[in-house]
Image: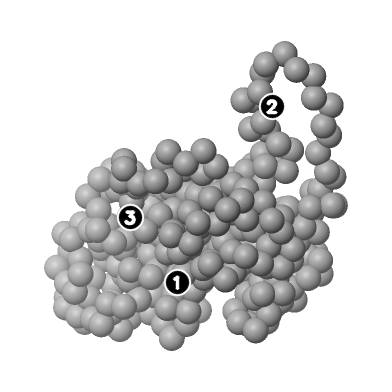
Amino acid sequence: MSTGRVNILFAAPAHLWDQYRDPLAQALAEAGVLADLSRDHAPEAVDWIVYAPGGPLSDFSPFPRAKGVLSLWAGVERIVPNATLRLPLARMVDEGLRQGMIEWVVGHALRHHLGMDAHILRQDGVWRHEAPKLASERPVTVLGLGELGLACALALAALGFPVTGWSRRPKAEPGLARCLSGRELLQDALRGAEIVVLLTPLTSDTENLMDAERLALPARGFVLLNPGRGALIDDGALLAALGSGQVGHATLDVFRQEPLPPDHPFWAHPRVTVTPHIAAETRPATASRVIAENVRRGQAGEPLLYLVDRKAGY
């Protein structure tokens, strides 16, 4: 491992500096990295860039000795198109983000599976002895089997749901009922599902993935959970499918425009639940350890974790 001091530029929105400064410094020290962490390093002195969109940096070209860009976010669709970024780019995958996503997906899947909304809303003195199905009788499809998608799919499978996982590239996971891949098998993955979870990356191939045609494939009245990316769904097609009853409920954590405008029809729709992009928040303590490990790896000449494939877009 290189023993020299490394200069790390924190190029994220200003409000994140106070949240990350101390956890990053501690994680770097624990990883054995001697580092100067700052928001103000001169470009020619920077070795590593910790980055999130919305900060002061948009041009990556004036960093002649930088070894890589380490994203604080899991999604990189706002970074990859930047033509000035020619450095290796690593996305964020950390235990806090993963656990948060599992809890959101499992919580809302169980909420709909058990019919909790009806019990909460119908406290009217009428005894309705209506037991829900068992999990084994309710097929679930998870679109996207990356770090987060696979973790959620396995958590649901562990509860007894028959889970079909779909990914763009072939994957094998014995813990799932089925693993399908490729555009040609997307219809098979969706057909008959009673709960659909969207966790694919957002690329030109996945934008509007759930359009009118695909929304018609799952079981009538199915539940759609989207903690992935807002643009995975054609909003107009979803509203139409909710109106027809093809979609029984949509629980959405991400949107094309955030914050979701107050006059957006999702807010007032009786079968839409809006959560404010909280399914998988990056936590400074756990994210800092991932950043520190990648700096350590890079300084030691080891491969970086979670490198982004620019051509694939994730």
Element class at badge 1 = loop
Disc 3: which residue:
257
In-front residue for pair 57/233:
233
Q: Are marks 1 and 2 in contact (CB under 8 Å)?
A: no
Q: Report whether 240 appears left or right of 12.
A: right
Work out which quarter of the rendered image holds the N terminus and state it.
bottom left
Q: Earlier in the sequence, mark 1 or mark 2?
A: 2
Relative vertical location of residue 112 with respect to residue 77 in this rendering, above or below: above
Q: Are marks 2 and 3 in contact (CB under 8 Å)?
A: no
Q: Which mark is residue 119?
A: 2
Residue at horizontal 66%, vertical 67%? 217
Q: Nearer the viewer, mark 1 or mark 2?
A: 2
Element class at badge 3 = loop
> Within the image, what quadrant is residue 207 found in?
bottom left
Question: Disc 1 versus disc 2: distance between alpha carbons?
Answer: 36 Å
Kindly identify the amino acid type of the residue bearing the numbered disc 2: His
Kindly identify the amino acid type of the residue bearing the numbered disc 3: Gln
Residue at horizontal 28%, vertical 72%? 47
